[in-house]
Image (tube, rainbow, N blue to C red):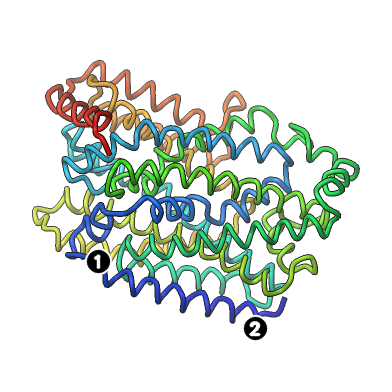
């Protein structure tokens, strides 16, 4: 596909999203932390569900999950369905997040933990850990766009140019009107993404002979793609290491859990969850079919992450539809980066600067948050230049680091005995351990870093908490408010 046609598509995408962002900015209320980062806690269920889907299903799906399917076969579908099971955590924790956020005015999950455990250093430590592990995940999205544009144009648009464009767009959308801008552009992007990708994958399947012939050909030429562990990629320990961090994704990733503060009501949150599940299930099947299609058409790609770009630039897909799908994938990746930028900047402004400075006005915190956005973007850009292969695996590696805060989150709502010392010790020690395991590619007993992260973090959180003093009164007040959400009629 020509670079000129792709550039035209990119420019149209930019102009449409700038218009949507501008219109959303006109609806933004007073410029405070809750308004900028949470949309004044007034987001409706429809927009929230599309935004949740666009943010969660980013470059990971159509580039990463398709690549995992190409590399390991049908095991990738099971891997993603485990994430679906993990979304049930939103049904359990979502109303509780919403209730305490509305009652106590929390802007970030880290702030919530700091208040619950009655120690500001809890918020600071968890925020810094989130920054360390989310920057690589941001780089994953940038790399996805780089691979997408380079793959579709045969290198006419270099990888680095694609990453630079994505970085600039993420900064602009984040700064323009905060989360309201991101969510409304998300909603538009999600609709484009799900409709076009579904239409195109159906076209590809029928070009390859229809579903019956498609799977028959796959069974005859690549039978290992339809069984587990197939070619050996998805052996049990690998599957376990990939799926455990993914199961806790909706809690461990602050750019996702922060959205639980945003719905205008519990009814809106329920709509968000149901809409997301429908969206996600369809998109999962579509992404896996993309991977299988690439296995049939291009069985010898240099890297699995090129599966989708190669299909989009092939004769199987009409050029116009190929560009539209490309825009949808690119939009989702930019959406995720923008959401992460906003979340990380809110963490730094609220829980790092806010806890270390005596000047803690909303205006100053908001200013710090906006200043931090381009700084984080540059760090993500530099990380993306490493060109790490298999985007899906790197995504899970980032979640393996974020999982160390899960015991503290669960304990916040269900265990009054949890302490600040338990949180800080578990997050720091297990977080450093995950970094070392990933850095030196170690798997003690054959178990991945995410498994060790959740086990060690849980043991340390419980063990240290039992030997230190818990903020009993604060815990009771917090848990009572969380439980009250179960009696609210929406």
Residue furthest left in the image: 358
At which x and y percent is residue 172? 38, 72
Q: Residues within 10 Å of mark 1 (few under 14, many from 20)?
A: some
Q: Disc 2 vs disc 1: Cβ atoms closer than 8 Å?
A: no
Looking at the picture, does residue 129 appear above or below residue 78? below
At mark 2, the secondary structure is helix
Image point (89%, 45%), residue name: 221
Q: Is residue 122 visible?
A: no
Q: Quadrant of the C terminus?
A: top left
Front-lying residue, 258 or 270: 270
Front-lying residue, 375 or 168: 168
Q: Quadrant of the N terminus?
A: bottom right
- In the image, 16: left or right of 254? right
Image point (36%, 45%), residue name: 254
Residue furthest front in the image: 489
- In the image, 239: left or right of 43? right
- In the image, 116: left or right of 443? left
Residue furthest top in the image: 466
Looking at the picture, does residue 358 appear above or below residue 320? above
The residue mark sitting in front, 2 or 1, is 1
Looking at the picture, does residue 311 appear above or below residue 404? below
At which x and y percent is residue 387? 60, 59
Image point (59%, 60%), residue name: 195
- For marks 2 and 1, the one nearer the N-term is 2
Looking at the picture, does residue 427 appear above or below residue 273? above
In the rendered structure, find residue 4 and report the number of the disc placed on it. 2
Check disc 1 and report the residue beneath it: 28
At which x and y percent is residue 8? 59, 81
At mark 1, the secondary structure is loop
């Amino acid at each position: 596909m020509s670079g000129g046609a792709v550039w035209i598509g990119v420019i149209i995408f930019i102009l449409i999203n700038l218009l949507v962002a501008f219109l959303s900015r006109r609806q933004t209320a007073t410029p405070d932390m809750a308004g900028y980062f949470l949309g004044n806690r007034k987001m409706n269920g429809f927009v929230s569900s599309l935004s949740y889907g666009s943010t969660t299903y980013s470059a990971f799906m159509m580039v990463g999950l398709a690549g995992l399917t190409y590399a390991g076969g049908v095991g990738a579908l099971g891997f993603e369905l485990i994430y679906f099971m993990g979304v049930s955590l939103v049904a359990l924790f979502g109303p509780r997040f919403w209730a305490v956020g509305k009652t106590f005015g929390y802007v970030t999950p880290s702030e919530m933990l700091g208040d619950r455990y009655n120690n500001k250093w809890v918020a600071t430590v968890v925020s810094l850990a989130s920054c360390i592990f989310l920057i690589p995940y941001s780089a994953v999205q940038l790399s996805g766009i780089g691979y997408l544009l380079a793959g579709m144009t045969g290198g006419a648009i270099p990888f680095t140019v694609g990453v630079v464009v994505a970085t600039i767009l993420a900064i602009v959308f984040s700064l323009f009107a905060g989360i309201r801008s991101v969510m409304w552009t998300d909603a538009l992007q999600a609709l484009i993404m799900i409709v076009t990708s579904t239409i195109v994958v159906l076209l590809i399947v029928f070009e390859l002979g229809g579903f019956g012939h498609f799977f028959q050909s796959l069974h005859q030429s690549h039978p290992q793609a339809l069984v587990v562990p197939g070619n050996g990629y998805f052996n049990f320990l690998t599957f376990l290491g990939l799926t455990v961090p993914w199961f806790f994704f909706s809690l461990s990733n602050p750019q996702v859990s922060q959205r639980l503060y945003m719905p205008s009501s519990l009814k809106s949150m329920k709509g968000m969850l149901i809409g997301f599940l429908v969206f996600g299930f369809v998109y999962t099947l579509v992404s896996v079919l993309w991977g299988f299609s690439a296995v049939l058409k291009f069985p010898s790609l240099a890297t699995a992450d090129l599966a989708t770009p190669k299909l989009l630039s092939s004769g199987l897909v009409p050029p116009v539809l190929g560009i539209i799908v490309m825009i949808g994938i690119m939009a989702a990746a930019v959406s995720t980066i923008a959401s992460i930028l906003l979340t990380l900047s809110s963490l730094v402004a609220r829980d790092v600067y806010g806890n270390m400075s005596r000047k803690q006005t909303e205006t100053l915190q908001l200013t710090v948050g906006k200043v931090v956005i381009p700084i984080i973007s540059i760090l993500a850009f530099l990380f993306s230049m490493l060109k790490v292969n298999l985007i899906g695996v790197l995504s899970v590696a980032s979640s393996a680091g974020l999982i160390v805060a899960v015991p503290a989150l669960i304990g916040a709502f269900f265990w009054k005995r949890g302490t600040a010392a338990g949180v800080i010790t578990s997050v720091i020690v297990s977080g450093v351990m995950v970094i070392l395991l990933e850095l030196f590619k170690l798997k003690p007993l054959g178990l991945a870093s995410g498994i060790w992260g959740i086990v060690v973090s849980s043991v340390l959180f419980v063990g240290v908490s039992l030997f230190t003093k818990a903020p009993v009164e604060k815990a009771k007040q917090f848990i009572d408010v969380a439980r009250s959400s179960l009696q609210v009629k929406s």
